[in-house]
Amino acid sequence: WTGIPALAKGTPKRRPLRWPATLALALAFGGYGFSVLHAMGFPGASLGYGIEMLGFAIGCFVQIWGPLKPFGSMERADEWDRAVRARAYLVTFAVFAVTTMVALALMMGALAFDYPREAVMQGGAQTLFLLFAILNAMPTAHASWSVRWQRDGDQPD
C-alpha cells in the first residue's frame, strides 16, 4: 500500500539528472551574480536571492534522486560507485574552493570600499547558500555528465 516493502526488496534505480542538476547550478550562480551586480542592495539582491534559493532547492532534490548512492544508506556501493563518487566529489571540491576564494575576495573588496553593513551581511548569507548549492548539485551534475548511461539508467556502459 505504501510501496515501502517493494522499495526495501530491491535497490532503488539511480538515474542521471543532467539537466536538473545543471539548472540548479545555473540558478544558484546566476542568482548570486545578479545580486553582486546589484551591489547586494534591495530590490535586486532580493530577486537574486530568490533565484539562488530556487537553485538550492532543486539541488537538494537532485542529490537525493541522483546517480550517486547516498552516504549512510542501506544500498551497497561497489567499486564503480565509489570511483564515480570520488571523482564527482573531487571536482566539487575544486569548484567549491574557487568559488569560496572569489566570494571572499568580493567580500573583502566590499569591506575595503565601505559597502553598507547590510550589503556585506547579505553577501555572506548568499555565499553560504551558493556553497551549499554547489555541495548538493555539483556531484550529481558531474556524475550525470561524465558517465554514459544506458536508457534504463540502471548501469553505465
Image (spheres, rainbow, N blue to C red):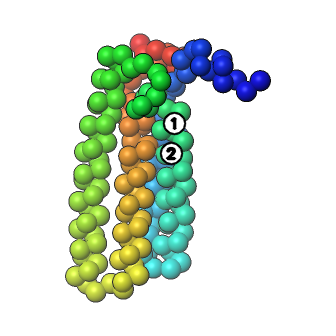
Q: Residue at x 54, y 69 (%)?
A: 47
Across and down, in percent, residue 112 comes to 22, 82
Q: Is residue 137 above or below residue 154?
A: below
Q: Label 2 sits on what residue type?
A: Cys
The residue closer to the viewer here, 50 or 145, is 50
Toward which corner of the image does residue 90 lie, by quadrant? top left
Q: Residue at x 23, y 59 (%)?
A: 101
Please name the residue that numbered disc 2 is placed on.
Answer: 60
Binning the other alpha carbons within 10 Å of mark 2 as few (below 14), some (14 to 19) or many (20 upward) gives some
Q: Label 1 sits on what residue type?
A: Ile
Indicate left or right for 39 with 87 as reference. right
The residue closer to the viewer here, 112 or 57, is 57
Indicate left or right for 127 with 94 as reference. right
Across and down, in percent, residue 157 comes to 41, 13
Query: Secondary structure beneath disc 2?
Result: helix
Q: Is residue 154 above or below residue 55?
A: above
* Number of the label disc, if any, that sits on residue 56: none
Q: Is residue 36 visible?
A: no
Q: Residue at x 52, y 25 (%)?
A: 15
Please name the residue that numbered disc 1 is placed on.
Answer: 64
